[in-house]
Image: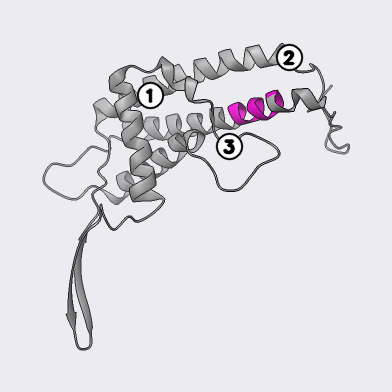
Amino acid sequence: MLSTANEPFQRVAVRFELEPQLRRYRRLLISCDDLQEAKATILKILESDLRFPRGKEPDPLLTALTTALVVSYARPFVNSRGHSRVAERTVPGSLLRVLTSRERDLHDALIEMRTREIAHSDAEVLELSIMLFPGGDGSISRLPRQPLRRVELRMLNRMIDKLTDEIDHLCMGLREQLPLGVWL
């Protein structure tokens, strides 16, 4: 029975021993949403015909969409800060076993890009030259992050499909353990 706008959801507490399964199920659902957001961003880049530029700076829209894509794709795999009582912090590492070695390389590169270039402006990867003057400074910086090429976007799209299928499989197993037909 679904809740109407006038009545709140009536959640049922699970038995203590089922709490880890519920936390994992919640993380898998959240991760599925993140992966679908990444997939939608890939499709937007492809249908907008935003291409990897040759010999010039990428379009700012392509850079912004690449940032959004990397952030949404990486969320399920990167430990969030703090401790959550609601959901596990990351998806199980075994989820990645469905990826080929080339796909795993792309996955690792995206996680690295997220960590070093997007979430934290890592001075080690940022190409920055500065010149100081008595009244200020001048600088030249180049962000090493490059938009993904179409072949990489298509590969990532297939990876998301594989990961989503694996999440569905894991959720099916967890549904066998958790109570059905109640809000948890």
Say left or right for 56 vs 181.
Answer: left
Measured from the top left, where is residue 164 in percent x and y?
50, 20
Q: Which residue is mark 3?
A: 89
Type of amino acid under label 3? Arg
Earlier in the chain: of badge 1 and badge 3, it is: 3
For the record, the magenta segment spans 21-29
Measured from the top left, where is residue 7 in percent x and y?
88, 36
179, 50: nearer the viewer: 179
Type of amino acid under label 2? Gln
Badge 1: residue crowd in 10 Å (few <14, some 14–19, many ≥20): many
Q: Which residue is mark 1?
A: 157
Earlier in the chain: of badge 3 and badge 2, it is: 3
Q: Which residue is mark 2?
A: 177
Q: Are marks 2 and 1 in contact (CB under 8 Å)?
A: no
Residue 65, compared with residue 128, is above or below; it is above
- Find numbered disc 3 in the image and state the secondary structure of the residue it sits on: loop
Say left or right for 130 vs 114.
Answer: left
Q: CA distance from mark 3 to mark 2?
A: 21 Å
115, 32: nearer the viewer: 115
Looking at the figure, which quarter contains the N terminus? top right
Q: CA distance from mark 2 to mark 1?
A: 31 Å
- Identify which residue is drawn at 31% across, 29% down: 106
Measured from the top left, where is residue 140 in percent x and y?
18, 65
Q: Are marks 3 and 2 in contact (CB under 8 Å)?
A: no
Residue 139, compared with residue 134, is above or below; it is above
103, 83: nearer the viewer: 83
- Find numbered disc 1 in the image and state the secondary structure of the residue it sits on: helix
- Find numbered disc 2 in the image and state the secondary structure of the residue it sits on: loop
Earlier in the chain: of badge 2 and badge 1, it is: 1
Say left or right for 53 vs 50.
Answer: left
Q: Are marks 1 and 3 in contact (CB under 8 Å)?
A: no
